[in-house]
Image (spheres, rainbow, N blue to C red):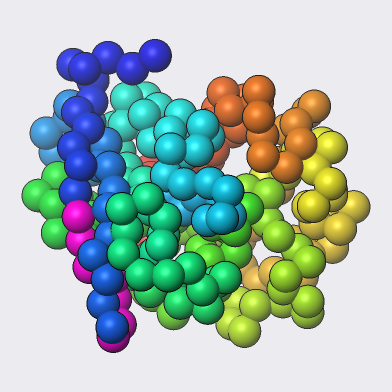
């Protein structure tokens, strides 16, 4: 449970990057701390069945603001909720993430030198697909990566710090397949397995959030990353 004195939530709209540009919707979680805060953008799972109110996205955004003093934005990809446009199964959604980063960095509370992206399922793939091309993104947390969609890997590797999280019983991102993928990634990386959890982390939101926040807090105070 979050305290209204520890964070504030406000609905925002912003434009996706690229052309044509679409009006997107999101919810910004603002910490009570007045100094510039590290920024975290959250990408939700599969648009056909999920949105920014996914239980894990909601818990993460609230706890990042309250416990870590971070500015967190969760948003709907194109064609989801009130976000304009049509879903493109991952082809154009990286432009939505780019727009979300532009929007949150335009907030007075944002620290532009500390930008993280957290993706879950489909959102993890979008995060790792886009992040190598945006130098503003300093770290990525990929939860329940859709390994079957990336074949031999992403077009360009993300070489900055990253954390991969999977559930012990994740049927889509099993540990025995994720481990060799993580080992092949360049740059600093880590992996965390949530005991008992499946792909969507249902019932294990708090445990997953704890692992994410522990990592993000350490990253936030590390110089140069």
> From which residue to which does the magenta span run?
13-19
Spot occupied by residue 128 in the image (x, y as percentages of width and height)? 56, 67
Q: Is residue 36 magenta?
A: no
Spot occupied by residue 19 in the image (x, y as percentages of width and height)? 28, 85
* Nearer to the camera, 112 or 222: 112
**Quadrant in the picture for residue 133:** bottom left
Residue visible at 68% across and 49% down? 144
Position of 43 with respect to 193 (left or right) is left
Above or below residue 145? Residue 2 is: above
Q: Is residue 17 magenta?
A: yes
* Nearer to the camera, 156 or 215: 156
Residue visible at 56% across and 55% down? 48
Residue visible at 20% across and 42% down? 11
* Nearer to the camera, 20 or 198: 20
Spot occupied by residue 151 in the image (x, y as percentages of width and height)? 78, 76
Spot occupied by residue 200 in the image (x, y as percentages of width and height)? 67, 39
**Quadrant in the picture for residue 33:** top left
């Amino acid at each position: 449970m979050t305290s209204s004195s520890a964070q504030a939530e406000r609905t925002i709209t912003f434009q996706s990057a690229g052309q044509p540009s679409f009006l997107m919707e999101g919810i910004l979680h603002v910490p009570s701390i007045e100094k510039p805060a590290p920024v975290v953008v959250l990408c939700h799972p599969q648009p056909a069945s999920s949105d920014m109110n996914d239980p894990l996205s909601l818990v993460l955004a609230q706890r990042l603001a309250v416990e870590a003093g971070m500015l967190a934005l969760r948003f709907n990809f194109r064609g989801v909720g009130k976000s304009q446009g049509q879903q493109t199964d991952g082809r154009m959604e990286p432009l939505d993430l780019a727009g979300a980063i532009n929007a949150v960095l335009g907030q007075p509370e944002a620290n532009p030198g500390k930008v993280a992206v957290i993706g879950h399922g489909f959102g993890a793939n979008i995060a790792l697909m886009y992040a190598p091309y945006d130098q503003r993104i300093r770290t990525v947390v990929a939860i329940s990566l859709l390994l079957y969609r990336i074949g031999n890997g992403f077009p360009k590797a993300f070489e900055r710090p990253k954390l991969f999280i999977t559930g012990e019983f994740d049927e889509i991102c099993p540990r025995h397949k994720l481990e060799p993928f993580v080992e092949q990634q360049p740059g600093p990386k880590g992996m965390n397995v949530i005991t008992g959890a499946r792909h969507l982390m249902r019932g294990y939101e708090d445990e997953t959030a704890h692992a994410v926040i522990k990592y993000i807090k350490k990253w936030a105070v590390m110089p140069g990353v």
